[in-house]
Image: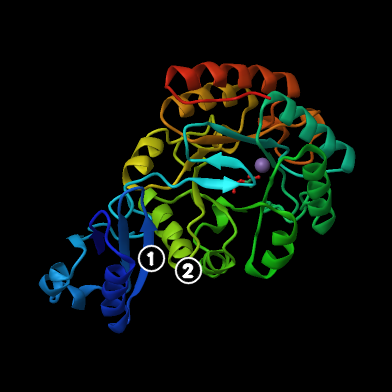
Amino acid sequence: MVIIMRAGASEEQIAEVSYLVEKRGMQIRRIIGEYQSILGIVGDVATLYSEREQLERLDGVENIVRISKPFKLASREFNPVDTIININGVIIGGKDIVVMAGPCSVESREQILETAHIVKDAGAKILRGGAFKPRTSPYSFQGMGEEGLKLLAEASQETGLPVITEVMDHQMLPMIMEYADILQIGARNMQNFTLLRAVGEAGHPVLLKRGMMSTMEELLMSAEYILACGNDKVMLCERGIRTFETYTRNTLDISAIPVLKQLSHLPVIVDPSHATGKWDLVAPTSKASIAAGADGLIIEVHPHPKVALSDGAQSLTPSNFIDLMKDIDCISQAVRRCYERG
Ligand code: PEP
Ligand code: MN
């Protein structure tokens, strides 16, 4: 349920409504818009419906809207205005397309520093790199751990790029938060509800990846966990889903972009690297994603993909990344989005 206050409603009027709602054991999440405030009610709202008329008569209340979707805080019904997330000055979810780029895994000081400079010069605004890796085989490279986080922080300091890295479980959260500007929740953890609650309480910006066999509604319900814990800095990430197709690593669900944008106010980021698994499919799917309305991309780039310790086959070389960024510039303008290089 959402209570829409009249334009110019006073703080006293809002306080009166909040008092009534909170007295019944529900919580208020307030969205302060340009002209009016919207009060989202969280909790078991069924009892409030019987008092709807009383609520509607309160001074300052314009309208009461029932949210029909199972995800409430994540829905556009709750917040019709796009959520904008500011990561140290990088605005995600606004007019500008934001590209996050870097290696699948941090492998060495030289590798992450070199990649950070390359992607920054090409126009990326956020540096990606895994330090704790969710690998299918326990014998595969598992990441550099905290040493990798320190190297990411050093690369961030040198370039000024904020950093995104994966948090695999809730116990790691305090350590990861020391180094990372955005917490990535991987596809395999999309329904790790303990982790979702923990990042919700932590309040740090989150990139939530769609599970490889999850529906869009399940993705939005997972986002709801984070929002319900009080963290509204959530980005949704389409990274391909598992289908019967074997030519590509996953199947990029392009339709997820407009559907998620219709259903939710949260920014939508696409990962064409994990979606396709093949470097030569990364550019076309990146361009399609921007054209379909994505707010940003997260792309794997490696100075020497052939010797990468993870996901080399889907990693772009620096020169391929630079070429792609030029194309992203053109597509962004064609769909009236901004994209600033360098
Ligand atoms: C990654 O970004 O390196 C990764 C493991 O992604 P996903 O969780 O989408 O597989
Ligand atoms: Mn990867």
Residue 19 quadrant: bottom left
The answer to whether residue 284 is above or below residue 176 is above
Q: Position of residue 56 (x, y in %)?
A: 14, 67
Residue at x 65% of width, y 35% of height? 125
- For discs 1 and 2, the disc positioned in front in the rendered view: 1
Occupied quadrant, residue 18: bottom left
Q: Which residue is mark 1?
A: 29
Picture mark count:
2
Colour pattern = rainbow
Residue 306 in picture, x, y percent from top left: 79, 29
**For the N terminus, which image quadrant?**
bottom left
Q: Earlier in the sequence, mark 1 or mark 2?
A: 1
User: What's the distance in space between the residues labelled 1 and 2, CA to CA?
Assistant: 11 Å
In the image, residue 225 sits, relative to residue 159, either above or below, namely: below
Could you tell whether 285 is left or right of 71 in the image?
A: right
Left or right relative to 29: residue 147: right
Residue 153 screen position, x and y as percent: 79, 49
- Is residue 146 at all visible to an observer of this figure? yes
Q: Alpha-carbon neighbours of circle 1 within 10 Å: few (<14), some, or many (≥20)?
A: some
Q: Amino acid at mark 2?
A: Cys
Which amino acid does the dot numbered 1 rest on?
Arg
State the quadrant of the C terminus: top right
Is residue 244 or residue 241 the one in the foreground?
Answer: 241
Query: Pointer 2: what residue?
Result: 229
